[in-house]
Image (spheres, rainbow, N blue to C red):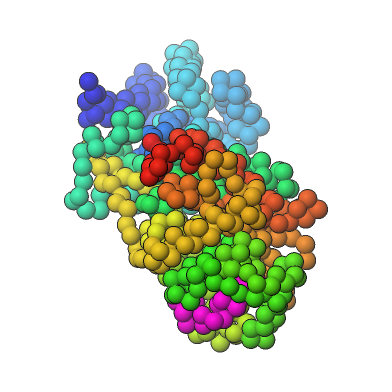
């Protein structure tokens, strides 16, 4: 039998108001007994923002909740003299453990004011102890300095998963409200007095899975259900941390998308921060690099060039090219990363061997108008418009730009001289995994207001390439993993993917750093019925260990993919009957 939800919320509200009334009565009790004493002026009122709703993951696991606590404040202008301040400081240190020196200094520095905070968060037990002590002293002594100290019930946002979802959840600060992530993007929805549901297409709470209904609706009755899976989040964070330590990289990002719907299943960046203690973190860590930092992607971008060439009909996977070891385009001579020439190769072999020379020749033959039209179709140069705050557009220089030259066409074809976000690169790969169709990425699966639910419906943005071109490219990407990026493979599964080792531009624009790289691997699994797209990116691995993506990002990709396949209960390819697909559960 389901609980009566309106009654449950009413009970929660009643308890909250009861606490407030209790504090007021406790504060007033002294004045009712000693009415002949001088009445206190009302302390300055600090208006608390409207309470905000809960946020849970796709299985109902709490990601953002409200924690109730008590604030300790005083009216310093009524605590006159150092003897009175000394007694208050000693009492609060004895009762609550507040440092004597801090309390005394605060009272002394604010002695002309009606309000000063002494502690921003104490427990209910501590609040009761303080009030009981005040009542006892009122009976024993009458007038006493502690009467000018009071407690006020407050709420504060709490993030039970800590650092694991910091860049997804963001946090709330008293000064600015929602900062970063969900808290900022949905800053107008989450408060109890915020905006309601966007349209009338809603369902009842019973439309939510049973596990998601456990904590919803909350007392503020303005809640969010995310597409993110807490377990997936922990998997990718653990493996990214392991990869950074193994290759001594300075930072990294992992993204997991559902290519069929566009739902974000996981997103993590390291280093991160604890949103419960954001005051202790560097402001730079609040930015979500997965959507707010751009980088040159390197050879992973070759899948976009190949997709454009396949879709436009200018090549097939078996088309033969001759690699002479260099290719002149505009004023630039392009070489392969190893400076070798490979002679006659198919387009599939060119992708598997990641040949810059052939990729530049393909883009040159395609021409700038067609090449850059496909880049725009894939979503580069504009934000993916995911519902997280802080997303940027990336940077694509086209012939319309006066600084563009024909050589840019060649370098852009293999991911140099342009800038993308990790989400843009993951979303472009999802297009290939989804038969050439771009889906709108999103992170909120449902909004809950009172007893109504509004679901986010997966939305197709456009058909970018044909299903046939996507299928051909998938087979080519399978060959990449099976021949040149074998460390990305997972035993029993066909994986489609591509590595990328990108140089890092110097800040003055004069060239690239000599030794350090950005390594990434992006792909999807199972290749013929993709359940997830996975992007792994690591910045500046130690070049004395290895600076190439096929030896750094690829094994991290493999470990994550293996754990995701296990967790999502996706059977190996060889366990399927003829004609059967891996649907999982």
**Where's residue 69, x and y in %?**
45, 30
Q: Is residue 267 visible from the viewing direction of this image?
A: no
**Where's residue 42, x and y in %?**
38, 37
Measuring 73% from the left and 56% from the top, which residue is drawn there? Answer: 547
Measuring 44% from the left and 56% from the top, which residue is drawn there? Answer: 433
**Where's residue 509, x and y in %?**
69, 75
The segment highlighted magenta reads 356-373
Q: Is residue 365 in the magenta section?
A: yes
Count of numbered labels shown in the rendering = 0
* Along the viewing direction, whichever of 438 and 44 lies nearer the viewer: 438
Measuring 64% from the left and 50% from the top, which residue is drawn there? Answer: 486
Above or below, comparing residue 450 to residue 195 in the picture: above
Using residue 40 as the reference point, say whether residue 491 is left or right of it: right
* Along the viewing direction, whichever of 135 and 211 lies nearer the viewer: 211
Q: Seen from this angle, which residue lies furthest left? A: 200
Q: Is residue 11 visible from the viewing direction of this image?
A: yes
């Amino acid at each position: 039998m389901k609980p009566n939800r309106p009654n449950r919320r009413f009970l929660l509200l009643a308890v909250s108001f009861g606490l407030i009334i209790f504090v007021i009565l406790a504060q007033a009790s002294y004045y009712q007994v000693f009415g002949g004493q001088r009445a206190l002026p009302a302390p300055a009122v600090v208006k608390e923002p409207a309470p905000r709703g809960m946020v849970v993951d796709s299985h109902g696991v709490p990601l953002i909740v409200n924690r109730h606590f008590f604030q300790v404040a005083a009216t310093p202008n009524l605590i006159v003299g150092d003897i009175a301040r000394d007694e208050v400081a000693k009492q609060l240190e004895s009762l609550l453990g507040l440092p004597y020196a801090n309390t005394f200094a605060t009272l002394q520095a604010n002695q002309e004011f009606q309000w000063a905070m002494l502690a921003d968060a104490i427990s209910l037990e501590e609040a009761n102890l303080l009030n009981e002590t005040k009542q006892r002293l009122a009976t024993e002594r009458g007038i006493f300095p502690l009467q000018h100290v009071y407690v006020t019930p407050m709420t504060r946002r709490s993030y039970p998963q800590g650092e694991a979802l910091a860049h997804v959840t963001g946090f709330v600060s008293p000064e600015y409200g929602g900062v970063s992530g969900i808290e900022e993007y949905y800053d107008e929805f989450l408060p109890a007095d915020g905006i309601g549901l966007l349209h009338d297409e809603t369902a009842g709470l019973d439309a939510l899975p049973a596990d998601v209904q456990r904590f919803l609706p909350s007392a503020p009755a303005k809640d969010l259900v995310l597409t993110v899976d807490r377990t997936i989040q922990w998997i990718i964070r653990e493996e990214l941390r392991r990869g950074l330590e193994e290759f001594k990289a300075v930072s990294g990002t992992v993204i997991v998308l559902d290519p069929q719907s566009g739902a974000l299943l996981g997103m993590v960046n390291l280093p991160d921060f604890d949103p419960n203690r954001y005051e202790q973190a560097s402001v730079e860590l609040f930015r979500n690099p997965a959507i707010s930092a751009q980088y040159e992607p390197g050879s992973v971008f070759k899948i976009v060039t190949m997709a454009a060439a396949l879709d436009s009909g200018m090549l097939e996977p078996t088309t033969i090219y001759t690699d002479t070891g260099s290719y002149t385009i505009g004023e630039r001579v392009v070489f392969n990363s190893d400076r070798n020439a490979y002679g006659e190769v198919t387009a599939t072999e060119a992708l598997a061997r990641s040949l810059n020379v052939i990729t530049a020749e393909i883009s040159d033959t395609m021409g700038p108008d067609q090449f850059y039209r496909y880049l725009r179709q894939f979503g580069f140069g504009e934000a993916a418009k995911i519902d997280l705050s802080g997303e940027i557009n990336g940077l694509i220089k086209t012939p319309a730009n006066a600084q563009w030259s024909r050589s840019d066409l060649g370098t852009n074809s293999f991911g140099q001289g342009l800038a993308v976000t990790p989400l843009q690169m993951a979303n472009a790969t999802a297009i290939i995994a989804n038969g050439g169709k771009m889906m709108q990425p999103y992170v909120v699966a449902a909004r809950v207001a009172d007893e109504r639910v509004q679901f986010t419906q997966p939305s197709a943005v456009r058909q970018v390439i044909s299903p046939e071109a996507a299928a051909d490219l998938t087979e080519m990407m399978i060959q990449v993993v099976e021949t040149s990026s074998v460390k990305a493979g997972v035993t029993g599964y066909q994986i489609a993917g591509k590595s990328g080792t990108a140089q890092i531009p110097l800040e003055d624009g004069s060239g690239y750093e000599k030794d350090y790289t950005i390594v990434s691997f992006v792909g999807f699994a199972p290749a013929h019925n993709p359940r997830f797209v996975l992007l792994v990116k690591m910045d500046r691995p130690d070049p004395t260990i290895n600076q190439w993506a096929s030896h750094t990002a690829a094994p991290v990709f493999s470990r994550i993919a293996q754990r995701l396949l296990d967790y999502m209960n996706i059977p190996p390819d060889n366990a399927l009957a003829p004609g059967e697909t891996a649907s999982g559960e």
